[in-house]
Image (cartoon, rainbow, N blue to C red):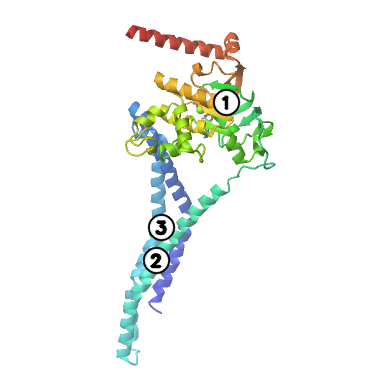
């Protein structure tokens, strides 16, 4: 009984520790997550940091997140200092309690030998209490961490899923009608798409142009329903995208993203993502149509080369060409094409242009263009500014209107002429 007294007391300090820890653990884990996120952001930004010769301090957010984590660790540790010290001391004091208790009781014992044997027994058995209590402590801490992790998972699971009004609406026509659409990213202040209406006729090509951040990519993701518009409607073939089942929508829409993400698998499998049941010949045809044969030929194992493995890197332009092959293989009637921002190399640009043409032939196309050279042949051009549509029309009519597009065009042309003359000088 005497040796159990410190065990009882250590239990009390253990609960004090858990009680105090629980309220702080959430913040502690939160700051750890924050620091991890900022670290990733920092690593992504290293080229910028290097280019501008900056230090870690220039990444203010990362630095602050480290400091915040440090404060949390210290506070968490300081809070637990007293109960932890009590806990450890009590557990380690069991033999002292036992020896003192033994000295106190030995005189009253009838059979001294029996008493000593019992005493020895308790002396040997009490370290087990010690080990057990430590295990209880670590397990309690682990269960707190697990509880917190589950809370975080629950938060994610509580996110609203996309809802479908009426299921199983089929799409038979492929024109796209966008009516007065508003969309704001979660926690953003301004609308990324601010009251946009436009119509893309079946088998026509519409180009979206505008400054960086004007909402072009966002508009395209709304059509593929990566997000739901806050107000307004987006219809494909007269059916709201909210009524089209996900599989039906994905079957009919090909999306070539601005920043291509190829998976860490072979070129063959990467392209096959477009249509998983495609034969090798079909994949080869798509690669050829997307001007990728020269990329495939230079890879060590041809189309079986795994992207992202040691030494296998594709440039941005090459990656986008593989992504275009994926789109060509999928052969969906609607193509959303987010042109990669910059290819300075004219040969690559020319190849991409050829691949675009193959992909968009007889399709309903929304093309986001960063170079005005690619939009001249579009049936209609829409100019976005801060999420709002400011001008629309054919290239010819927009140039004649002498508006914003017209000045963008003039600027583009003068840059072009300047580049041309530079070539002449160099020659
Ligand atoms: N995932 C996101 N979360 C929050 N805000 C975002 C997100 N993506 C874009 N934004 C913001 O929405 C606005 C529109 O961005 P969007 O990517 O649509 O522009 P963009 O016209 O495609 O630009 P770019 O020409 O650089 O590709 C910008 O202000 C941008 O900062
Ligand atoms: Mg974009």
Residue 166 versus residue 123 in the image, above or below: above
Q: Is residue 212 visible?
A: no
Mark drawn on residue 135:
2
Which of these two is toward me, 355 or 309? 355
Which quadrant holds the C terminus?
A: top left
Secondary structure beneath disc 1? strand
Label 1 Cα neighbours within 10 Å, binned few <14 / some 14-19 / many ≥20: many
Asked if the residues shown at circle 2 and circle 1 are in contact, with their CB atoms under 8 angstroms apart, the answer is no
* Residue 202 shown left or right of residue 349 in the figure: right
Which quadrant holds the N terminus?
A: bottom left
* Residue 231 shown left or right of residue 263 in the figure: right
Work out whether mark 2 precedes mark 3 in sequence or the reverse, and give the earlier one: 3
Work out whether mark 3 precedes mark 1 in sequence or the reverse, and give the earlier one: 3
Mark drawn on residue 80:
3
Q: Which callout, 3 or 1, points to the residue nearer the camera?
A: 1
Determine which residue is flagged by label 1.
366
Q: Is residue 147 visible?
A: yes
* Residue 242 shown left or right of residue 413 in the figure: right
Which of these two is toward me, 174 or 140? 174
């Amino acid at each position: 009984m005497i040796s159990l007294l410190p065990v009882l007391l250590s239990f009390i300090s253990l609960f004090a520790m858990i009680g105090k820890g629980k309220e702080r653990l959430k913040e502690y884990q939160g700051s750890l997550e924050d620091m991890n996120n900022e670290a990733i952001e920092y690593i992504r930004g290293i080229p910028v940091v290097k280019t501008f010769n900056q230090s870690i301090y220039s990444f203010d957010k990362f630095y602050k997140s480290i400091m915040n984590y440090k404060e949390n660790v210290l506070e968490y540790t300081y809070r637990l200092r007293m109960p932890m010290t009590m806990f450890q001391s009590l557990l380690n004091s069991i033999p002292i309690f036992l020896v003192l208790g033994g000295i106190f009781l030995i005189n009253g014992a009838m059979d001294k030998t029996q008493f000593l044997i019992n005493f020895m027994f308790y002396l040997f058995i009490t370290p087990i209490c010690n080990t057990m209590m430590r295990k209880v402590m670590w397990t309690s801490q682990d269960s707190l961490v697990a509880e917190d992790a589950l809370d975080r998972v629950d938060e994610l699971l509580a996110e609203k899923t996309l809802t479908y009004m009426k299921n199983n609406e089929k799409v038979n026509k492929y024109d796209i009608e966008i009516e007065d659409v508003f969309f704001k990213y979660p926690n953003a202040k301004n609308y990324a798409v601010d009251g946009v209406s436009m119509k893309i006729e079946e088998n026509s090509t519409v180009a979206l142009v505008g400054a960086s951040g004007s909402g072009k990519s966002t508009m395209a993701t709304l059509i593929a329903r990566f997000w739901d518009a806050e107000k307004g409607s987006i219809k494909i073939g007269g059916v709201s995208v909210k009524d089209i089942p996900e599989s039906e929508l994905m079957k009919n829409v090909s999306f070539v993203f601005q920043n291509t993400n190829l998976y860490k698998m072979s070129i063959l499998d990467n392209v096959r993502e477009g249509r998983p049941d495609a034969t090798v010949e079909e994949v080869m045809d798509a690669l050829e149509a997307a001007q990728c044969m020269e990329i495939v030929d230079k890879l060590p194992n041809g189309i079986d080369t795994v992207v992202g493995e040691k030494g296998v890197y594709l440039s941005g332009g090459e990656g986008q060409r593989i992504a275009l092959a994926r789109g060509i293989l999928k052969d969906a009637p609607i193509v959303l094409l987010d042109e990669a921002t910059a290819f300075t190399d004219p040969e690559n640009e020319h190849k991409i242009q050829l691949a675009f043409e193959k992909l968009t032939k007889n399709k309903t196309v929304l093309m986001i263009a960063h170079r005005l050279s690619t939009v001249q042949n579009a049936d209609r051009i829409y100019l976005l500014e801060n999420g709002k549509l400011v001008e629309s029309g054919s290239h010819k009519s927009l140039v004649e209107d002498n508006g914003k597009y017209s000045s963008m065009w003039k600027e583009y042309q003068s840059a072009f002429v300047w580049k041309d003359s530079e070539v002449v000088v160099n020659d």
